[in-house]
Image: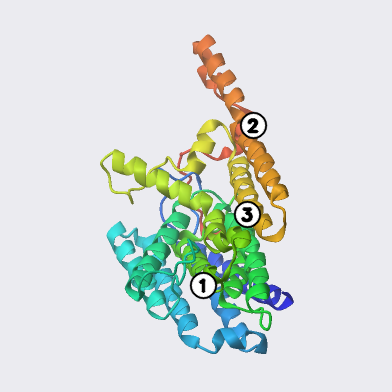
């Protein structure tokens, strides 16, 4: 585990250093787009943080390749090179989109290409813990893997709307996934605890930790589509790699839940992105629009509209991620499962309370507005909401002398 922590540290340090450099260069050469209608920030901010995260990922993979602990991971270098090549391609497409706002069809085609590259080199869904069945055929495994990677990339990209949201959610969920994949490796491969899934999880944790200081509210640097799609790609490949670590057919009925965990837990840590993605697609299709049409009705936008501040909304979504991820991890660690069930139930109740708490304050404010229509301007202002940063007035672009 200490070696995995070292890989996370390498990714964090490199990402942090390049985030500082990229932020300075972006301001110097004005590499930031105009504020869009759906954005909640009010100051033009660089969106090239994904480049720094990619460089941190590459550095960590390189260091790992030089260590004997990860010899089994790099014994067959094809999957690793495919992941890095796919990451490079998706970052290039993401940077282009962050600068020129590409059409969604171009991004989707690029996502299918990189997913196909990863699947082609053997990072595929090999088994599904459903009655001890494996995936029906190589072709089915290939297609299912591509669809999963594309789904996760878009799901993570969809929630990237608040300062620190994607980086924090990915850090929490992959921290839990790192523990799970490491413990799973101890059970399935006692002679070697180091595997591709654990390495990817550790690197994601490090890259997000190194980037988060620049992305915390109020953000000085955004990861952009390059960063969010990169995280989605790596999370998907890590989750897919786990499916080859356990043979459901060898498990008894008493081990039924552990057999399902290789699939359940990756979806659990992705619950927030997948839920937001599903709701967004259904909402847009019902309105007769493309499922990739941007809008301002994501879960994080709804939390702001409910009365939460920017920071409160982010912390609430962190809480949901932590409760679900840790709750399902406890099913793997603890027996009997009563403690895990209690944790999930109590955590869900607390998160629900935190999510709905501002409704009363919002209702009181709306009631005051109705009672005193002549004082609408003053009645609608709540100092507790001042940190929500939801104003849409443009701020003049900074000059070079104003940039630290």
Element type where label 1 sits in the image: helix
Label 3 Cα crowd, 10 Å radius (few <14 / some 14-19 / many 20+): many
Residue 241 - label: 1
In the image, is residue 391 above or below residue 79? above
In the image, is residue 340 above or below residue 83? above
In the image, is residue 73 above or below residue 379? below
The image quadrant of residue 5 is bottom right
**Identity of the residue drawn at 60% across and 38% down:** 309
Circle nearer the N terminus (1, 2)? 1
Quick check: 46 left or right of 183?
A: left
In contact (CB < 8 Å): disc 3 and disc 1: no
Q: Nearer the viewer, residue 388 or 29?
A: 388
Residue 181 visible here = yes
Q: Position of residue 80 (x, y in %)?
A: 50, 81
Quick check: 267 left or right of 218?
A: left
Which residue is identified by label 3? 328
Circle nearer the N terminus (3, 2)? 3
Which residue is identified by label 2? 384
In the image, is residue 371 above or below residue 194? above
Q: Nearer the viewer, residue 203 or 179?
A: 179
Q: Position of residue 102 (x, y in %)?
A: 32, 60
């Amino acid at each position: 585990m200490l070696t995995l922590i070292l890989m996370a540290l390498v990714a964090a340090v490199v990402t942090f250093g390049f985030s500082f450099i990229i932020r300075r260069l972006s301001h110097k050469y004005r590499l930031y787009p105009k504020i869009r209608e759906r954005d909640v920030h009010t100051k033009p901010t660089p969106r090239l943080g994904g480049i720094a995260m990619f460089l941190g990922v590459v550095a960590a993979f390189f260091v790992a390749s030089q260590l004997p602990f990860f010899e089994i991971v790099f014994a067959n270098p094809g999957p690793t090179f495919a992941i890095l090549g796919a990451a490079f391609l998706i970052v290039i497409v993401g940077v282009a989109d962050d600068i020129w706002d590409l059409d969604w069809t171009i991004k989707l085609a690029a996502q299918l290409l990189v997913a196909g590259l990863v699947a082609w080199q053997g990072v595929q869904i090999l088994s599904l813990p459903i009655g001890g069945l494996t995936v029906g055929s190589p072709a089915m495994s290939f297609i299912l893997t591509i669809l999963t990677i594309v789904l996760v990339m878009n799901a993570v990209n969809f929630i990237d709307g608040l300062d620190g949201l994607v980086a924090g959610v990915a850090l929490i969920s992959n921290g839990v996934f790192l523990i799970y994949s490491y413990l799973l490796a101890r059970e399935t491969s006692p002679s070697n605890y180091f595997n591709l899934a654990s390495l990817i999880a550790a690197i994601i944790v490090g890259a997000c930790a190194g980037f988060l200081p620049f992305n915390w509210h109020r953000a000085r640097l955004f990861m952009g589509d390059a960063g969010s799609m990169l995280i989605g790609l790596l999370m998907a490949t890590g989750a897919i790699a786990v499916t080859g670590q356990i043979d459901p057919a060898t498990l008894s009925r008493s081990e039924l839940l552990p057999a399902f965990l290789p699939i359940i837990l990756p979806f659990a840590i992705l619950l927030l992105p997948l839920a937001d993605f599903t709701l967004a697609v259904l909402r847009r299709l019902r309105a007769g629009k493309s499922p990739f049409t941007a809008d301002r009705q994501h879960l994080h936008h709804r939390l702001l509209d409910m009365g939460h501040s920017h920071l409160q909304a982010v912390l609430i979504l962190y809480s949901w991620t932590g409760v679900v991820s840790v709750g399902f991890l406890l099913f793997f660690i603890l027996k009997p499962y009563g403690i895990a069930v209690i944790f999930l139930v109590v955590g869900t109740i607390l998160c629900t309370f935190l999510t709905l708490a501002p409704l009363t304050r919002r209702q009181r404010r709306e009631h005051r507005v109705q009672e005193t229509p002549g004082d609408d301007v003053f009645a609608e202002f709540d100092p507790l909401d001042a940190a929500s940063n939801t104003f849409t007035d443009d701020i003049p672009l900074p000059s070079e002398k104003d940039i630290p």
